[in-house]
Image (spheres, rainbow, N blue to C red):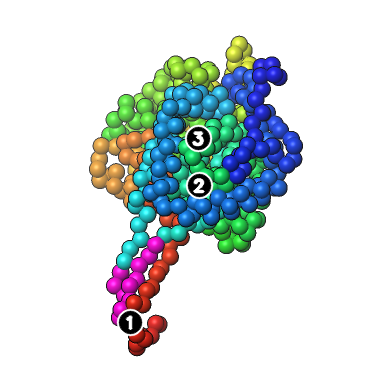
Amino acid sequence: MAATQITTHKNYICGQWVESVTGRTYQVHNPAHTDQIVGEFQTSGAEDALRAVAAAKEGLAIWGNTPAPARATIIYKALEIMGRRADEMAQTITIEEGKPIGDAAGEVKRSMNIMEYAAGEGRRMFGYTTPSELPNTVAYTVRRPLGIVGIITPWNFPLAIPAWKIAPALICGNALVFKPASATPLSAVKLMEIFEEAGLPPGVLNLVTGPGGQVGNALVESPDVKGISFTGSTEVGTELYAESAKRLKKVQAEMGGKNAVIVLADADMNKAMGGIVSGAFGSTGQRCTATSRVIVEEGVYDQFMAELLDRTSKLTIGDGIDPSIDVSPLASQNQKDKVMEYIGIGTEEGANLAYGGHALSGGDFDQGYYVEPTIFTDVSPDMRIAKEEIFGPVLTVFKAKDLTEAIDISNSVEFGLSSSVYTKDISKAYEYINTVETGMVHVNAPTLGGEVHLPFGGLNSSGVGQREQGTAMVDFFSEVITVYIDHAAEAGERAKFI
């Protein structure tokens, strides 16, 4: 792409598109064709973040006092605009993140779903009334915005994850500083354009692109920022949570996963296979809810493996912009290097490389970050490839003698995000639901995703703080205020509070 065609995108602060204080920019390249430049973006620093916080302070004064149904009107308008730009948004996701265009279109739809749901909460910002133990007293609760909130999002869902944080935060009346992943800022820029066109007041939503260390640390350290909503690695999320706790900030952190599917002997094998292959290799395995482990009851293990290898061999690999492609490139050179390192670790640990395991080269593959779908068997729970999040198209397969052993293997990792069991036995399904240690549990369905009106999040190292989406989203992005009103005409005896 010629230099004259490169668009330089700016930060969005207080309703204006502005250059960073640092004066530096960086380029983002298409993961499928690394010679193609997606755009040039601001390399912001702490001063840019603090400028955005100051703008959010001004925006909060307006937005926090705007009635929630009126806030909803603007979110509904943004939803309508995103619907008109849906194809453009999907293509943007694919060219900057790399995922297949069908997955990208699904991400846009998910973003619209959460915006619709969040806008609806504008007329359901409920408190409650309760009888008081005191005479002539009314007691009730109301919700108040949390204040200024930092939104920090990852590269693998560059539109959906920002949307499912931003829309709930806005409907609750907060003002925001949004720091997207450095690798995927174009979707964030376009999301700002949508809210700008929808009429969001200046300062309410501010965008700062650049390195997470400087911008993120500034948000954590600022006394004006009252909350942080983070999605990313467990390592970064744990440190962010600890530093925020020192400053008494409200934090939600959605982190890693090592999600397992259990296939019992009575499972519908065709149904299980479809869910496992899409869960493991769809979006090139770059989802926190991706299937990275399969635990198969030994009576059907051989049949399962034969069908798994056959299904995997039929997957097509290439540029995700082609709708016929099943597996697209990894998002970056760093991701490719990490996945290839783990494949090497697996072979060194003694696991059997049953399929794939190679970086692809030649022809169009030379232009992108391509790795074959990879399957390991003869894996033990203490191996690193069995315990650590790889975040790529790598699937580890275990054999178990029964459901009890399978659940033990499933629970043997530090993560606890999503899990699944395939069985026709309702008793075993409920045994699994009641004993598996994950925040989201699926029966006869993939480990992927979730619905916007239900809480999203995990246990243990997969998440900390209040859940995202569903009614939980209002609980995080607002504070509950308890109100007592003594309406007696004259002073009287009051009961003593204990």
The dot on residue 10 is none
Horizontal relation, residue 429 to residue 115: left or right = left
The location of residue 442, given as percent across then percent down, is 35, 41
Vertical placement of residue 141 versus 334, above or below: below
Which residue is the site of mark 3? Answer: 197
Looking at marks 1 and 2 on the same chain, the residue that comes earlier in the sequence is marked by 2
Q: Amino acid at mark 2?
A: Glu
Looking at marks 3 and 1 on the same chain, the residue that comes earlier in the sequence is marked by 3
Q: Nearer the viewer, mark 3 or mark 1?
A: 1
The location of residue 69, given as percent across then percent down, is 38, 49
The dot on residue 254 is 2
The location of residue 276, given as percent across then percent down, is 40, 30
Q: Which residues are magenta?
A: 130-142
Vertical placement of residue 237 versus 358, above or below: below
Q: Nearer the viewer, mark 3 or mark 2?
A: 3
| Label 2 SS | strand
The dot on residue 489 is 1
Q: Residue at x 50, y 19 (%)?
A: 321
Vertical placement of residue 373 versus 67, above or below: above
